[in-house]
Image (cartoon, grey):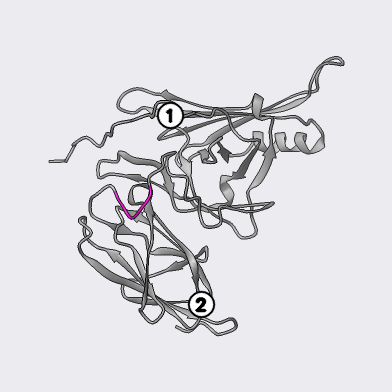
């Protein structure tokens, strides 16, 4: 018989905590065609969401970057509402983004946004990015233009987006490879479902670890007790999974040890620092729900510049 025990949690609010409304003045978008791999939302065995945050990064086609649109924040808004009937309700996420220009570039943008299945990233006033668009359902984008009226009128190109999703505009803490540079190259440690939890903790349950690990923001496929070569210095190690715990590294001839902090309920872990050649790095992980069983996962052999990577 299926375990249907509740996964719900209490929802607290500290008296006097300011809740900052609105969105920031730059949004990002891309065609779903250009997304090679999506980050994932975490579910339990019954298919229920256990987190509102994506785990992992968006992987894009080669030489493709997120495009940006500057908007009038005071006239733009992100909302979400339930749709459908029990037990099949989903969320309809809606974005209204007002760009002040109506020149040729804005008009061209209207043409290809209208006829494309897009994904949008919107940053809230706390610095957290929200995703409008899903890999499960199409995104509807419609654009209107207003050239203004009279000497006191105003021009605008208004982008209206509607996207069905499992939850209200999921959070995204991964990197964003945009035209103006990479945003959150190592992920945003302050962004996890809008909460402030951190530390080497998980929500409990059997740990699982994704085989793709990001070393210096580059994906590597690792295996248990395997050896992975990477060019130094090693400045970041990012790991994703579920219920992760006990993550740490040992280096400097095994004389030094650092914890890899786990966040987002055990779904993300990020270490930052600097370890150079000729060190090796042993990565350890917890392989039990209690965290009492800590075992060697894989080893990173640090190469110096120009040294060939062996088998």
**Label drawn at residue 276:** 2
Which residue is at the front of the view, 264 or 258? 258
Crowding around mark 2 (Cα neighbors within 10 Å: few <14, some 14 to 19, many 20+) is: some
Q: Does the magenta stretch mainly form a helix, a strand or a loop?
A: loop
Q: Which residue is drawn at 32% across and 68% down?
A: 284
From the image, tell me which residue sits under label 1: 91
Identify the element where label 1 is drawn. Answer: strand
Question: Does the image show residue 69?
Answer: yes
| Image position of 156 (left or right of 49) | right
Q: Quadrant of the N terminus?
A: top left
Q: Which residue is drawn at 60% across and 45% down?
A: 31
From the top left corner, tell me how far across and down residue 171 is, in percent: 47, 41
Measure how far apart labels 1 and 2 are at the Cα level: 47 Å
Magenta residues span 198-202
Which residue is at the front of the view, 254 or 140? 254
From the top left corner, tell me how far across and down residue 117 is, in percent: 58, 39
**Label drawn at residue 277:** none
N-term-proximal mark, 1 vs 2: 1
| Image position of 245 (left or right of 98) | left
Question: Does the image show residue 135?
Answer: no
Q: Residue at x 87, y 16 (%)?
A: 151
| Image position of 268 (left or right of 305) | left
**Outermost front residue:** 16
Q: Does the magenta stretch include residue 296?
A: no
């Amino acid at each position: 018989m299926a375990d249907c025990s509740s996964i719900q949690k209490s929802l607290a609010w500290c008296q006097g905590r300011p809740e900052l409304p609105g969105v920031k003045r730059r949004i990002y978008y891309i065609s779903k065609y250009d997304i090679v791999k999506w980050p994932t939302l975490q579910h339990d065995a019954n298919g229920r969401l256990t987190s509102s945050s994506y785990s992992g990064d968006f992987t894009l086609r080669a030489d493709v970057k997120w495009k940006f649109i500057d908007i009038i924040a005071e006239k733009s808004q992100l909302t979400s509402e339930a749709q459908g009937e029990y037990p099949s309700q989903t969320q309809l996420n809606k974005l209204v983004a007002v760009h002040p220009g109506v020149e040729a570039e804005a008009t061209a943008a209207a043409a290809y946004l209208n006829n494309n299945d897009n994904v949008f990233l919107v940053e809230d006033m706390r610095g957290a990015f929200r995703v409008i668009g899903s890999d499960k359902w199409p995104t509807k984008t419609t654009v209107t233009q207003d050239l203004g009226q009279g000497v006191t009128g105003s021009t605008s190109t208004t982008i209206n987006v509607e996207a069905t999703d499992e939850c209200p505009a999921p959070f995204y803490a991964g990197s964003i490879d945009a035209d103006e540079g990479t945003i959150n190259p190592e992920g945003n440690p302050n962004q996890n479902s809008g909460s402030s939890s951190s530390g080497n903790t998980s929500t409990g349950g059997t740990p699982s670890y994704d085989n793709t690990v990001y070393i210096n923001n580059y994906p590597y496929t690792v295996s248990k007790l395997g050896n992975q070569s990477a060019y130094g210095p090693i400045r970041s190690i990012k790991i994703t999974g579920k219920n992760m715990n006990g993550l740490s590294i040992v280096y400097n001839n095994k004389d030094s040890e650092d914890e890899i902090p786990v966040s987002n309920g055990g779904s993300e872990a990020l270490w930052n620092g600097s370890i150079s050649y000729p060190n090796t790095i042993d990565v350890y992980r917890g392989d039990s729900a209690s965290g009492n069983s800590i075992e060697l996962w894989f080893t990173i052999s640090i190469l110096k510049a120009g040294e060939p990577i062996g088998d």
